[in-house]
Amino acid sequence: MLKRPSTNTRPTNIRRIKKPATLTYDGFINALTRTGLGALNPVSYSSYLYQNFTSNYQELLNLYKSHWVVKRIIDVVAGDMLREGYDITSQITPEEENALKNLTRSLRINQKLNEGLCWGRLFGGAGGLIVVKGDEDLSLPLDYDTVELDSFKGILIFDCKNGIYPTGDIIDDIDNIDFGLPEYYNISNDNFHSVKVHHSRIIRFEGRKLPMVERASNNYWGASEIEHIREELAKRDNVSWNISMLTFMANLRVLKLFGLESLQGRANADGISNLQHRIEATNAIMNSNGLLVLGENDEFQSFQYSFAGLGECYDRFMMDISGACEIPVTKLFGRSPAGMNATGESDLTNYYDMIREKQESILRPIYEKLLPIMFLSLFGKVPEDLNFEFNPLESPNDMEKSDLATKKTGNITQVYQAGLISQQTALKELRQMTELTGDFSNITDEEINKAKTEVEQGEGMAIPEGMPMPDEQEELPF
């Protein structure tokens, strides 16, 4: 009986023929019309060269000092990141919060952080040395247990091109939050020679992020914010200068002299000199009150240059720079929103979203290192639930402030009437609204100290006449 061969078996005497390898393109191309990438057209011959503009310290410095657009690009973002500050969400007293603000103001912490952010954005990186009184060996890790009262003395800022240089040691402890970054830095300036500093004493202001290889070759710093804006900046500057030069040719005057060619051909040096003097004299008296004398066959013409379309062209280059640096045109160049019904609110909303992202990625790690030291220097302890949130960048208008004050006052009144907080706490909450709404600034410390500190059920604070309760209020428009 014959058996049918299994379908899983293959004859052993058949040899596979390998097809020759061919080059495959993943994309559109039409050789006949010369369209698509790889065809014989100008687009196919475009390329992007490797550049490292961040390493050109002198040109970056010159741009910041002399170019107002570059200075705005660097300063505006850094200023807005710090403008509204932060709010401690931990359980601390108003007195402790005021002491923290006073320390920040007296040591000019915001000014130093602004300086570090600016140099980090301009040069690709900067570092801040945390100064603690009594530390002698800066190469040792900063021990929080040794931070005494009134020992924190501020921050010293150095840019990555001139003052702070990472050593070759890299943090290899995977549990360390700075894993993969330099373990030590050499710091030097005019006041002292190079000093080796442990990374726990340094706050980093890193520029635009780079791939690992580029980051390592750049001493573990980032790229300058001007690196990718330079080409757009050069285009805008060239257009601006060309428009400026065109204004000198706005009115071209042409004088046709009869027989000029033959005169130049046979005239000697004295004849040519006399001709030049005649032209100069004619040009000197040419004004609205002057008299122009011409020969019978001479001719004078005036041509006016049209500047139509130059403004729109110039605006396009401004928009390219604005998009490259992520700053709205209205904020970068100080221009009012253009177009019908344009308010610029959507542009500012996108811009504020970008600022919040930078606050979380750049400022938060810095404050998380600074705040424990500041608390130890002020109070000798750090709150167990130490946390903070950045205040919103949008400033409410007068109507929004009024609605917010009404709502918050009603909430405080209701909670006090319910017997959940004391009279003293209610007054403190009302005065704390001053920074946000501007109300209740006249509540004094004496009045707060005289208020009752006990929570009394059923006895509440009198509600001013006409004050709506929270359930009677409408939702706020923001």
Image: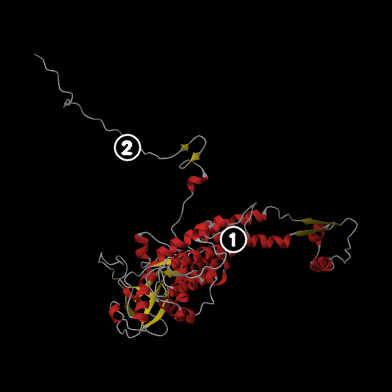
Q: Residue furthest left?
A: 1
Q: Secondary structure at mark 1?
A: helix
The residue type indicated by label 2 comes to: Ala
| x, y percent for residue 355 | 47, 62
- Residue 273 or residue 92, whichever sits in front: 92
Give the percent coordinates (x, y) of residue 306. 73, 54
Label 2 neighbour load within 10 Å: few <14, some 14-19, many 20+: few
Q: Nearer the viewer, mark 2 or mark 1?
A: 1
Alpha carbon distance from label 2 to label 1:
56 Å
Task: From the image, tell me which residue sits under label 1.
Answer: 330
Compared to 218, does 141 lie above or below?
A: below
Query: Sequence-wise, which precedes: disc 2 or disc 1?
Result: 2
Please state if 431 lies on the left or on the right of 92 as rendered.
right
Q: Residue at x 58, y 68 (%)?
A: 68
Q: Is residue 206 visible?
A: no
Q: What colour-coding does the image apply?
A: secondary structure
Secondary element at image label 2: loop
Q: Considering only vertical position in the picture, is 33 above or below 230?
A: above
Give the residue type that dot 1 points to.
Thr
Residue labelled with disc 2:
21
Residue at image location 77% in from the left, 56% down from the top: 304
Q: Where is residue 450 shown, x and y percent of the image?
A: 46, 80
**302 versus 137 height, above or below:** above
Res 174 quadrant in image:
bottom left
Residue at image point 68% right, 52% down: 309
In the picture as drawn, the residue positioned furthest to the front comes out as 458
Q: Point out the image quarter for the N terminus.
A: top left
Is the residue marked by circle 1 packed among few (<14), some (14-19), or many (20+) residues within 10 Å? some
Residue 89 in view, yes or no: yes
- Quadrant of the rendered image containing residue 151: bottom left
